[in-house]
Image (cartoon, grey):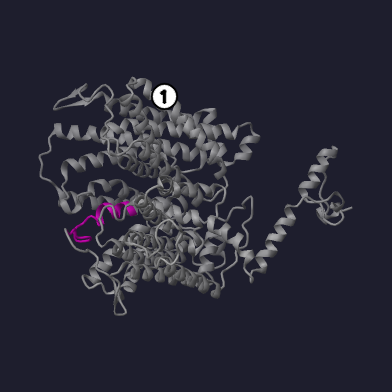
Amino acid sequence: MARIRLSVVVATVGATVGAMVLTIVAWKGAPVTSETFLVTTYIGLFLGALYAMYATGLVVVYNTTGVFNFAQGAIGVFAAFLYWELHVNRGWHSLIALVVVVGLFAPALGVTLDIVIMRRLRTASLVVQLMVTVAIMVLLLSVVGDIWKADTPRRVPYLFGIENGRDLGPSRLPWHRLIVFVVSIAIAASMRILLRWTRIGTAMRAVVDNRELAALNGARPNVVSSTSWALGSMLGALGGILIAPELGLDPATLNSVVIIAFAAAAFGALRNLPLVVVGAMLIGLLRSHTNAWLDFGSDFRFAHLSIAPLLLLFVVIALPQARLEVGRLAHNLRRKERYTNWWEGLFGCGVIILLAVVFSGGWLDFGIWDPGSWGARELNSANEAMALALIGLSLVPLIGWAGQINFAPLAFAGFGAFVYLKLAGDSGNGYWIPLVGLLCAPLGALVALPAARLRGLYLALMTMAFAQAMSLIFFPHPWVMPVIGTGRQFPHIELFGITFDDRRGFFLLIVSVFAIFVYALVLLRRSRYGRRWMAINDSQAASATLGIPVVRTKVVVYALSAAIAGIAGVFWATVSGNVDSVQGFDLLIGFNIVLLVAAAGVSVPMAGIFLIFIPLFKGFGNRLEDTGNVDFLVTLLDLLTTYGPGLLVLGMVFNPRGALVEMGRGFAPILPWRADARAEIAAENAQKREPEIGELGLERPFTPEEVIAMDRRLGILDQVVPKEGYGAFRG
């Protein structure tokens, strides 16, 4: 309890002092009257009610299924566009459209997600669960973008109109906002009653604690989980429809509301619905009063939007230290992994460089266009691809080996670009790049200090809040990424007396850097630290028992990941020359990076190479479009670019370890020196082979499952297994 009180005091004092300083510095000087204060307050309560609706859905799904649904906001976005389609575009009555979307479509979507995907994630790791829900979010937003094009302006009308409402002195409270507030409070109260004092609520909480034990006591786990996902989808859909009149029908804007809901849910420790509502109201009031009374100037023009991620950071700091947990016994024990030999890693990196030279030189002709070297567009796409691959490489030791979730790779990359811009200036001196990595490492260690106290979901939320705060406060400042009208913001890199100002030379440089980092990670995985990180991933309690300093090891791996991402950010910024401070390091781009690396196999150093497919497909499609007569290929590549990352990650439902791991297992037996892989495949095939009747009990012992099946078939009562085990049942 002492630790809890200390962390709460530190977070509260820090938040209070920070708020007082900001208020003094950024005060507009506008007169505060009772009328303006009242209007500002009711706007804040209305916003808080909307956030509470989203957050309630998140908490209900998390407490009844054990899965934190990052797609909650995307469900609301899809529902808002569908409501617009029915009500505005097709002329349906608003009440009918609302019932169809919230009462029919949303629960059907939730049940479908549960049956097709979520039930298969019950025993999956937290990394896989989060990646799959993020993939669903990306897929839903992509579907919305394809069906309802962004070039058409759309507005969702207020319920009963914006003019109709109740007078509040100097302004009018629209019925729409009053309905939102009342409905939000009613939903939170009803969900509290449902989960605490009803039979179905008790069954929901029992199923998430122990599915098998709940089934033995009469619960129906599949029905309960489907009901939970239907409720969560309905709340997300209702929130999206009700907030759309305020924010407009923009997918990115509507989806960003869910980040605010994350902060509100964390304020209630992801379980306490009354505190969740209080947190949502607090965020709404802070945003409303900040807009009314504070002016941060053009240098911090997005600062008022950072209240939610900052509150989330303070909530995380206030959380008590997580207790160490032992590893859980999985249904299928993980196969012992083979470490790559040093010479195998060296050979693989050499192959990467060789293929880069061959492809960029145009030495391979596939008959789609005339032979010759890659053009400017192809090389630009390839450079962008390799920069993304290098950023993705930073996640391998952090997520793949240490199991520490990180949604902020682009935040570290952007910080690296900023450091390089200040160090190198207009010279483009490449010798500053190693120093960039060294200066980014302390930032990673700083993030790791509160992160090291936590695990799992809170760690993911904290890194996401950090990325959002950086993109709203740090990167938009003109001193960080100065906006220029013409010329290159980031100069061409000069290294070893060579200026890499041609696209192919820069491509070969970044491929070489990527290969060097891959080989370094191959060697690092075989080292003491590599084994420590993987031990922490398996069981922190066991690692601490063996004398491994858990906190220090986490800090080191975060620092290493930040250093790699910072160096990658230099190349990412240099590819384009000019970086949009807001869009260049956007959180959604970071989501796509994490998704593709996870789908490839985040424990494999080569996983980052999967990120080349996004820009390469775009460049390939542009080239095909120029040639004509291949419209179907252009469409196919466009679909792969849009939906590929999400679909690849959904494959983790069936293959949690990633595509590269399975591809490697299939490719390894054909290598002359991999006799161990051939022996492993032969053993698996022998185990799968149906045994002959004469073999059972003679040449091959009965398995426990076979003994139990025969006993039940013969009607023999179960008996105590002999001391010598099931092998005693031979012959």
Residue 111 belongs to the span the image colors magenta:
no
Where residue 286 appears, as percent x and y from the top left, is: 25, 42
- Would you place residue 225 above or below residue 542 in this image? above
Where residue 9 appears, as percent x and y from the top left, is: 33, 52
**Label 1 residue SS:** helix
Residue 233 left/right relative to 693: left
Residue under label 1: 100
Q: Which residues are magenta?
A: 467-484
Residue 482 belongs to the span the image colors magenta:
yes
Instruction: Mark yes or no: residue 281 visible.
Output: yes
Q: Where, by quadrant of the figure, is residue 88 drawn?
A: top left
Where residue 556 appears, as percent x and y from the top left, is: 43, 67
Q: Where, by quadrant of the figure, is residue 210 drawn?
A: top right
Q: Residue at 51%, 34% (x, y): give it.
A: 112
Where residue 571 appears, as percent x and y from the top left, is: 33, 65
Residue at the bottom extreme, as displayed: 497
Amino acid type, label 1: Val
Residue 512 left/right relative to 403: left
Instruction: Mark yes or no: residue 8 visible.
Output: no
As rendered, which of 16 and 391 lies closer to the eye?
391
